[in-house]
Amino acid sequence: MKNVRAVYMQWAKQHAHARWDLCGSNLMPCSLDDLPEAAAAPQLNGSNDEGYGPLVEAIARRYGVAANQVATGTGASGVNFLVCAALLDAGDDVVVETPGYDPLFAAPQLLGARVVYFERRFDDGYALDPGLVERAMTSRTRLIIITNLHNPSGVRSSDDALAAVGRLAERSGAHVLVDEVYLDSAFVNTGHRTPDAGRRCAASLGDRFITTSSLTKSYGLAGLRCGWALASPDVAERVRRARDIVDGTGVFPSERMSVVAFEHLDRLAVRARSILEPNYAIVRAFFDSRPEIEYVEPAGGTVVFPRLRGRADAGTFIDRLFREEQVGVVPGRFFQAPAHFRLAFGGARETLENGLEGIGRSLDRV
């Protein structure tokens, strides 16, 4: 498996950054001014062999689950890998959505599993279609991987569709991994409050489901690398044992600071809304004024996935946008959709406004 790699992640780390960079999907980072109590939290050493107890308990309270249903890891991507390592053997099949986020394809492949894709279609509003999932399943399917909110479109899956996928998994002895790293920023576009403690997550739909998430996309705390999985006690234990092999334990100062973050999630959610709601309003107004662009409206999150109407590949436009306007967006080819580009709106408003102005000028020259 030496040639397995996450092509998008490599590009994200190595590409030349534009002056007006609309590539990064993280929410604008917090400072200590946003969470002043965190400055007093660090302590170099402590007990966290099975996850730092206060952090595990804070996550469990947040979702209304038992502590033995929580496993922690290094960000959502780290936990996603641990789930794959816990549940997959070489030769197993994994069903994964497309367009999709390439670490979710690469992790199973690195472990020797075969990836089978099902489509989330633009013409269907990127809705999760259990029928397409079923067609992709084989007798060797052991895991189904879904993002909710969908990365890259920001579309939310219905509970009914997720439950239907869960029934498919139950019949075949598979599990369903639902990456919910963007879900806490759902509803921001309609002005509703972020769901509070005990909110419904995929893991609440049954023991076949595993929810993963982190403090990164919805709360602006990427530097803490705080990720978690919610699952049945048996699966959570298997994830903890997989972590024994990968990195053993978390970074103790980060875990203590993450506890402080959980104590102030409401404050951080207000901050997120103050960034995302007005920024998305700017994006929506711009797209709606440009007939050259079509898109599916996201349910929230930090990204949107438009495409150039009538074009099979947006690569030339994206390259010219960077060269002539110093505006960066993520090429859709990294999400198996070359007519599209992914645009992030979780950063500074000045960057967003200048980036959209550059896109407009490029469209005018087409």
Image (cartoon, grey):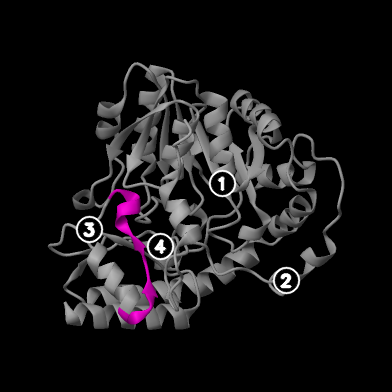
Q: Which residue is mark 4?
A: 303
Residue on which disc 1 sits: 76
Residue 81 or residue 214, whichever sits in front: 81
The span picked out in magenta is 324-336
211 with respect to 66 (left or right): left
Q: Residue at x 54, y 42 (%)?
A: 212
The location of residue 107, given as percent across then percent down, is: 48, 36
Outermost top residue: 139
Q: For mark 2, what is the residue?
A: 32
Measured Cα–Cα span from mark 1 to mark 2? 22 Å
Crowding around mark 4 (Cα neighbors within 10 Å: few <14, some 14 to 19, many 20+) is many
Callout in the foreground (4, 3) = 3
Report which quarter residue 188 is drawn in: bottom left
Which one is in front in this view, the residue at disc 3 or the one at disc 2?
A: 3
Q: CA distance from mark 4 to mark 1?
A: 17 Å
> Residue flagged by tag 2: what amino acid is it?
Leu
Could you say which quadrant of the image residue 239 lies in?
top right
Alpha carbon of mark 2 to alpha carbon of mark 4: how far? 25 Å
